[in-house]
Each structure stands twice: as C-alpha cells, then as structure tokens.
Image (cartoon, rainbow, N blue to C red):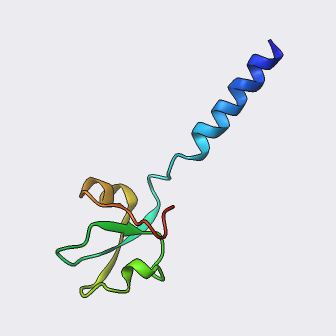
Amino acid sequence: MRIMKIVLAVIFILTTSFVSAPDRNVYICTGPKSVAYHLSTRCRGLDRCSASIKMVPQQYAIDKGRRGCKLCTR
C-alpha cells in the first residue's frame, strides 16, 4: 500500500510539472511565414523577424497554429 502511494505521488508530480501555463505571455513575429512562438524577445529565433514582434497569450499562439520555438521552449 505504501509503494502504491509513492508511485501515485511520483506520477502526479511528473504529469503536473510538464503542463504549460495557459495564461503565459509569449512572443510571435507577425511576418507571414512565421510559425513559432517564443518565451523571450531575446530568443535567437526572433533575430530574423522582418516584421514586428508581438506579445500574446500562449493559448492564442497555439490556437493560431503556432508551435513552440525549438530553441527557447525545449
């Protein structure tokens, strides 16, 4: 019974620690070919943005088809 409680506690911790915060603000490039969102304006992935950089809620970026940047959202 004690082992079962430990296993359940570990599973709970692992599953809740990887859930992203839906109300987090992220940054997107407003250019027509942009496909990612970024956690910081200092991300190297935004260096080539030829349009403006806009702060939006993470869920908005996901709803618009954006994926997490491979550099800053690992």
Residue 36 on image: x %, y %: 33, 66
Question: On screen, 21 above or below 36?
Answer: above
- Where, quadrant-wise, is the N terminus in this rendering? top right
Quadrant for residue 37, please give it: bottom left
Residue 21 on image: x %, y %: 50, 53
38 left or right, relative to 8: left
Q: Residue furthest left?
A: 32
Q: Residue at x 49, y 69 (%)?
A: 72
The one of 24 and 31 positioned closer to us in this rendering: 31
The one of 54 and 32 positioned closer to us in this rendering: 32
60 left or right, relative to 32: right
Quadrant for residue 55, please give it: bottom left
Residue 58 on image: x %, y %: 39, 59
Question: On screen, 40 above or below 20?
Answer: below
Q: Residue furthest right?
A: 2
Residue 26 on image: x %, y %: 42, 68
Q: Residue at x 56, y 47 (%)?
A: 18
The one of 23 and 11 positioned closer to us in this rendering: 11
Question: On screen, 65 above or below 13?
Answer: below
Q: Residue at x 69, y 24 (%)?
A: 8
66 left or right, relative to 1: left
- Image mark count: 0
Quadrant for residue 49, please give it: bottom left
Q: Residue furthest top?
A: 1
Question: On screen, 18 above or below 51?
Answer: above
